[in-house]
Amino acid sequence: VQLQASGGGLVQPGGSLRLSCAASGIIFSDNLMAWFRQTPGKQREWVATITSSGGTSYTSSVKGRFTISRDNAKNTLYLQMNSLKPEDTAVYYCNARVWWGQGTLVTVSS
């Protein structure tokens, strides 16, 4: 199983980024998928989840700013991040059950 995350980078506060996670080796459409994030010295934090049928849920700190979505035809998970804040700075990981991607760094700074 491979989960390849991409799309991170440096963005100013208030800006936007879209993360992608390309999955292989799993039946993507059958799997609940999630995004997590981690900053140095802290535990990995759950950000958002999308079920196989498209139901979504978010941690309270990103609700209304982030949108998780999936394209089952492309085996790809997305995280659209708007109105970014410095506290959103972290390495973002995609997750499918026990499998993790390698992470992509998002830095929000002026």
Image (cartoon, grey):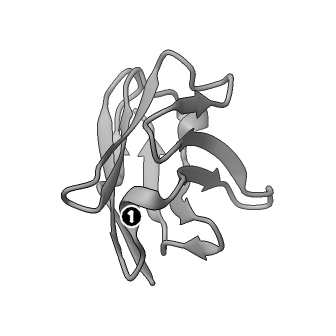
Q: Where is residue 80 in the image (x, y as percent from the top left)?
A: 35, 35
2 relative to 37 in the view: left or right: left
User: x, y percentage for residue 41?
Assistant: 79, 61
* Frontmost residue, 90 versus 98: 98
Between 90 and 37, the residue placed more toward the observer is 37
- Across and down, in percent, residue 89 comes to 54, 44
Residue 94: horizontal and vertical position, in percent? 50, 60
Q: Nearer the viewer, residue 27 or 91?
A: 27
Left or right, 41 with reference to 104: right
Residue 91 vertical position relative to residue 2 in the rendered view, above or below: above
Q: Which residue is drawn at 38% across and 57% down?
A: 29
* Quarter of the C terminus within the rendering: top left
> Which image quadrant is residue 6 in?
bottom left
- Residue ID for mark 1: 28
| Residue at the (44%, 40%) spot, across then down | 53
State the residue at coordinates (45%, 47%). 107
Query: Which residue, as the protein is rendered here, is positioned at the far top?
Result: 64
* Label 1 residue SS: helix
The mark total stands at 1
Amino acid identity at mark 1: Phe
Q: Residue furthest left?
A: 73
Q: Residue at x 71, y 61 (%)?
A: 40
Looking at the rendered image, the quarter that the N terminus falls into is bottom left
Instruction: Using a 10 Å C-alpha cutoff, classify the residue at mark 1 as few (fewer than 14 neighbours), some (14 to 19) or many (20 or more).
Output: many
Q: On the rendered structure, is 17 left or right of 53?
A: left
